[in-house]
Amino acid sequence: MVPSKFTMTVMIFIMMVSLYYFSRHVEKLARTLFLWKIEVHEQKEKVYEMRRWNEALVTNMLPEHVARHFLGSKKRDEELYSQSYDEIGVMFASIPNFSDFYTEESINNGGIECLRFLNEIISDFDSLLDEPKFRYITKIKTIGSTYMAASGVTSDVSDGYICMKQSLILSMHVATVERKNSLLTGRNLQQNQNQSQCERPSATTDWGLERTEQRHKESKEALIQEYFL
């Protein structure tokens, strides 16, 4: 038996020990909950990033209004999508002589440089469609070295003349880019025939390419001013 004069001291000691272990338990739970919140936040970020990439992939594969239809639809039994239009325009922009340009030789790093060159051209076309004045032009798909686009298929189209005019302007831009890249392709073909190994372009070649790009830029601006300003 504990003497009565020590009873209060023992009770206080037991309470202090209990409070200590209780506080440690609460702290452990708080730390665990904090780590869980961080993990859940990271998982949400990953899910959001994955969803964003999936939406970007679907938008890249399908026209924007069609992608919105499938991404926002809650119907599970809807498998096909179709829409009829009275007036639309379809354009095919093909890279000339790309099949002759494409080689898998060591000078082109097994064909990787050729594909990189094609990707740059397609990226230029995509950049054109991102401009506000081409909002009625929709990219359909790419078939090898051919770029397919259409006008008048978006839901906010109300003026067919605007669509045709923008299609013509876009065709002029594409023709200008194709002409510039055709010259670059011919230059690369000539270099492939004259060189047995890959060499770094000289300063003179870079200067010549800059002059060629500048001339085509001036020609493009002159055409636009002549026909549309």
Image (tube, helix red, strand yellow):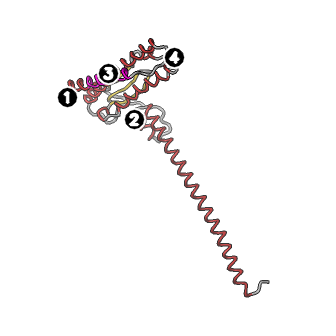
Does dot 1 land on a helix, a strand or a loop? loop
Marks 3 and 4 in Cβ contact (< 8 Å): no
The image shows residue 35, relative to residue 73, as above or below, that is below
Quick check: marks 1 and 3 in contact, CB under 8 Å?
A: no
Closer to the chain start, of discs 4 and 1, is 4
* Residue 92 seen in render: no
Residue extending farthest to the top is 193
Front-most of residues 105 and 157: 105
Foreground of the two, 188 or 147: 188
Amino acid type, residue under disc 2 in the picture: Glu
Looking at this rendering, what residue extends furthest in the front direction?
Answer: 203
Q: Which residues are magenta?
A: 203-220
Q: Which residue is mark 4?
A: 105
- Rendered view: 64 above or below 204: below
The nearer-to-camera label among 2 and 3 is 3
Residue to which mark 3 is pinned: 212
Quadrant location of the N terminus in the rendered image: bottom right
Position of 30 with respect to 119 (left or right) is right
Q: Residue at x 38, y 19 (%)?
A: 184
Sequence order check: which comes first, mark 2 or mark 3?
A: 2
Q: Secondary structure at mark 3?
A: helix
Residues under labels 4 and 1: Cα distance? 47 Å
N-terminal-most mark, 2 or 4: 2
Q: Earlier in the sequence, mark 3 or mark 4?
A: 4
Q: Residue at x 52, y 45 (%)?
A: 47
Q: Quadrant of residue 4?
A: bottom right
What type is the residue that disc 3 sits on? Answer: Thr
Which one is closest to the eye, mark 2 or mark 1?
1
